Image: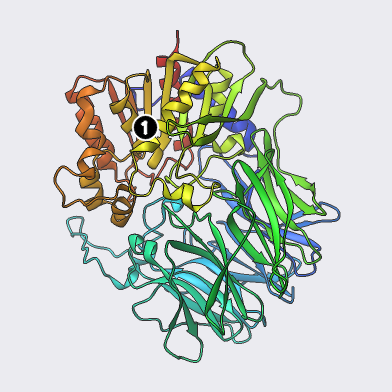
Amino acid sequence: MLTERDIRRTALYAEVQGYFHSINAPGNDKIVDADDITVSPDGSRVAFTGILHQDITLAPVTRVCVVELRSGVMIRLVAPSGSDRLPRWSPDGASLAFLSDREQAGYLKLCLCRGDGGGPVHSAPKVDGVIEAIHWSPDAQHVLLVVAGFGADAAGCQGGATVYDGQNAVELPAWAPVVDTGDAANLWRRLYLYHVATDQVRMLDTPGINCWEATWLGNKQIAVVSSTSHSEGSWYRSVIRCIALDGAPPRVLYEPTDQIGVPAAAPSGRTLALLEAVCSDRMIVAGNLLLIDDARGVAERVNTGSVDVTHIAWRDERHLMFVGHRGLETVVGEVDTDSGLVTEQWASLERTFGRWYPTMWPLPGGGCAVIGEGYDIAPEIAVIQQRRYQVVTSLDVRDAREDKPEIKITPVYWRARDGLEMQGWIVRPQIEGPLPLVMDIHGGPVWSCRNRWQGRLRGTHVLARHGVAVFYPNPRGSGGRGLEFARLVVGDMGGEDTYDYLTGIDSLVERGMADPKRLGVTGISYGGFMSAWLITQDPRFAAAAPISCVADWYSQHRTSQIPYFDELFLGGSALEPGGKFFQRSPVMHVRQTRTPTLQLTGALDQNTPPTQALEFHRSLLEQGVQSILLTYPTAGHGIRGYPEVIDATTRYVGWFLQHLAR
């Protein structure tokens, strides 16, 4: 079955498709997922990006949804076509801004409507690029736009390809070459200002500065996470610059030791908050919370009680809310920036928030609104107030009458070979005895596995229904354990972290939870590399399924959009013969590999180009190892879109069921 291109008529495909039908309700016009939550200035309602599936064989569409917090009643903005997303209220609550491609598929424009979501929708003038973020000025006179040029790099969590470039399409002969100079003007990220009263847009003049993220610093300045190159790799060395609207030269406000992100300023602009962290991916930041006094230029770290902060937002001029991880817990807290007092408002293992890392939005009277979820808890709109978590609206569309197999997620802990405590999660059916087990390794390496909704975990629930457990480890380098723990993987990727995974499996075997003769390994990105790496280092695995892998660090460095990443996390150089670029490349060790391997890769991936999987595939075949390579022509970094995700899940599940059966 797995060697055929079309598997849609197989029983397993029907089972997997049925599973995705059950959690996504295609064709039923139901919102089944959410992102980008925000709160109205008066605290009476929340808005978010709602996701619905019109057809399981097509990509989902998004709608701006507004929920009354008191009643739980939800309305949607009507979109005649296309998708709407990223709602943001003006500070006075009079207007709701959002992004939409309703006028041209794939091209997002700024749109505005009344604050209650009603009335006509007004489209702002076009900009020369794709809008990635919007921010209202404190006085509600302007909307700041962060705009990626057509064809600019996209981060791994955005798909690792390029942003929409249809605007630049020109009718040329099929033989015309693609020209790459490494520095075309359309590859930069710029800032634009939309003036509400005049309905005009202008680009800010920032030559030589690439603007990754930005926020208002009062009404006359903008704080920008910026670099002097547009390349994705230059993000790792970004600094905070202040850009004045009066045309004064940009000034550097803060130069970090590590990476920075999520800037947020108090309404007056007096204080800028941001996160500094050890990061392996742009837009995935978990670390220290810093407060910077704009007048004095002094940065102070806030003691958040061992929480790696992932998102921040100001409730008012004095109070800054934060959310993040402490180990496996998701934690919400608040800082009184006048007194320095930090209060923890909520913590739990049962739920987490946010698509990549936890996010929230403050309520004006205290507390926050979140999009909560857990392994068997579908996304839900909720508020946290006075240390209580209260569900406002659940987006669960599963049939309550349907028999559900008893499958649970539980935290697990073990000791690495150097004595460090490691943490993770295991999803398993409630069946006695050691079970076949698939270890699913997260990307990064600086990221973390969380108690997430099952619909985000590829084929885990289907595997569990077939009696297979799935192990989600958080080895050294993972978020939630502090910057020093994250830093342990920097310069040693594929070193001691290798044994964190193996000791984790050893622990599960010793506890009688995993069958040592029926072990599989998978993962995406760094997890794809580690999946390929582990089977060249240890013979215990009966099957592997690397996704978006790195197999050869020499060629990865010269074909990926993030070459600085491998130098940072390997601690070596691609110019050095026989160094870590050689020592930690799976293709250099395939002689000792016998594990049957299924690989999944996207043809448009620029983070881990598809040639990486091809190198590993052909190296395995050369050694007589069973290997299948699946290349999805319209996919980027990871297999994320429908219907590809159904096909990929079917093959991934089928591969492990085939090789882990008794």
Q: Would residue 166 be visible to someone looking at this image?
A: no
Question: Is residue 112 found left or right of 147 in the rendered image?
Answer: right
Residue 410, given in percent of the width and then of the height, sits at: 63, 29
Residue extending farthest top: 662
Q: Amino acid at mark 1?
A: Ser
In the foreground, 599 or 61 = 599
Quadrant showing the N terminus = top left
Residue 561, given in percent of the width and then of the height, sits at: 31, 55
Residue extending farthest left: 577
Which residue appears at 71% of the width and 38% of the height? Answer: 396
Quadrant showing the C terminus = top left
Question: Is residue 528 found left or right of 326 in the rendered image?
Answer: left
When asked about the image quadrant of residue 249, the answer is bottom left
Residue 85, given in percent of the width and then of the height, sits at: 59, 59
In the foreground, 485 or 388 = 485
When asked about the image quadrant of residue 658, the answer is top left
Q: Which residue is mark 1?
A: 531
When asked about the image quadrant of residue 218, the answer is bottom right
Which residue appears at 36% of the width and 35% of the height? Answer: 530
In the foreground, 118 or 287 = 287
SS for callout 1: helix
346 vs 187: above or below: above
Q: Residues within 10 Å of mark 1 (few under 14, many from 20)?
A: many
Which residue appears at 75% of the width and 55% of the height? Answer: 75
Question: Is residue 294 found left or right of 2 in the rendered image?
Answer: right
